[in-house]
Image: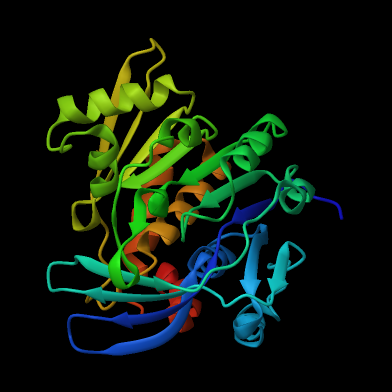
Amino acid sequence: MQLGEETIALVGSINRDTICTPDGVQVESYGGMLYGILSLAQISSATVFPVGVVGIDVQTAVMSLLDGCSKINLSGLRFTSHQNPHCVLTYDDEGNKQEVLCGGVPPIDFEQIEPFLDCRAVCVNFITGTELSLDTMKKTRRSRTGPIFMDVHSLTLTTGDENRRYLCKPRDWESWVACADFVQCNENEASLLADEPLVDQEAVARFGERILGLGPVGLLITRGSKGSQTVSRSAGGQVEIRSYGAASSGEVLDETGCGDVFLMGFVREYLKSADLEAASEFANKVAGINCCLRGIEEIGQMGRFLEA
């Protein structure tokens, strides 16, 4: 396999999803890393290499969703006899969600990631939070010279009674973050890691300083309808915070996968321009489009919205 300049590896999990939206609609779908894979295939010319472990119970459905797209190479997927993760997501009118996660597959090992270390970008998206071990993440960092983009997402979730998921600060979160060049988290996840609500610039600056001090060059904080922020260092070495407004493409129908799509938009534009502002604005744009689509089956309409 020859991995050229226009290649992006996505490391994560593919979920079976049951999505319950505030308007009373329940959608049975597939999600997790699929939101990143399929949106990136819509917005980028790069060849996309998903790297993950998938339960045999969903193999036929997953292959039908991914097979046939020339920009998606499935050589990084491994299928197992274990039951695939099944996530039930229930949203309220304020955009808050409750998650219940059942099932699970073995973790991704370094040997599965290794063939894709020469991709132009490697994106690690924690959908279940158990995709790979910290040792595997550290080995991936040591073995790669190109950028690693990380969405911490489900690293900040643990499972309680009746498989309900709730926020819980990982003891070793700094070691995970130190393995990435760009770190993404939503405002709730960021506040959890920061040990304080990120309600003003001073709090964001304190958290940003902490993240950048671990090694990443950029922090991305998504804030839903309030847009997003980036934290980086100026040419003089000072912490620099920039804010970007959310982009709306119509009525919000389903917010599932918006963080995944945001990261893909950021990666696509950053690889193209190396410009934080341009990358963040494009990321907000495609995340806004995703809100207007129901489930993974409508991701194929993203290109039409972009052209409008």
* Image spot of residue 189 (x, y percent): 29, 46
Q: Is residue 222 among what the camera can see?
A: no
* Image spot of residue 22 (x, y percent): 18, 80
* Image spot of residue 187 (x, y percent): 24, 46
* Image spot of residue 125 (x, y percent): 50, 53
Q: In the rendered picture of this protein, how many numbered marks are placed on residues? A: 0
Quadrant of the snapshot with the C terminus:
bottom left
Is 54 left, or right, of 192 in this rendering?
Answer: right
**Residue at the image point whose x is 62% and y is 57% from the top:** 107
**Residue at the image point whose x is 75% and y is 42% from the top:** 118
Quadrant of the snapshot with the N terminus:
bottom right
State the image quarter where residue 159 is shown.
Answer: bottom left
Q: Is residue 56 above or below residue 200?
A: below
Is 220 left, or right, of 72 in this rendering?
Answer: left
Q: Residue furthest right?
A: 1
Q: Is residue 303 above or below residue 263?
A: below
State the image quarter where residue 89 is shown.
Answer: bottom left
Q: How is the image coloured?
A: rainbow
Is 83 left, or right, of 23 in this rendering?
Answer: right
Is 38 left, or right, of 161 in this rendering?
Answer: right
**Residue at the image point whose x is 37% and y is 69% from the top:** 290
Q: Is residue 1 among what the camera can see?
A: yes
Q: Is residue 128 above or below residue 281?
A: below
Q: Residue furthest top?
A: 236
Q: Is residue 280 above or below residue 218?
A: below
Q: Residue furthest front?
A: 161
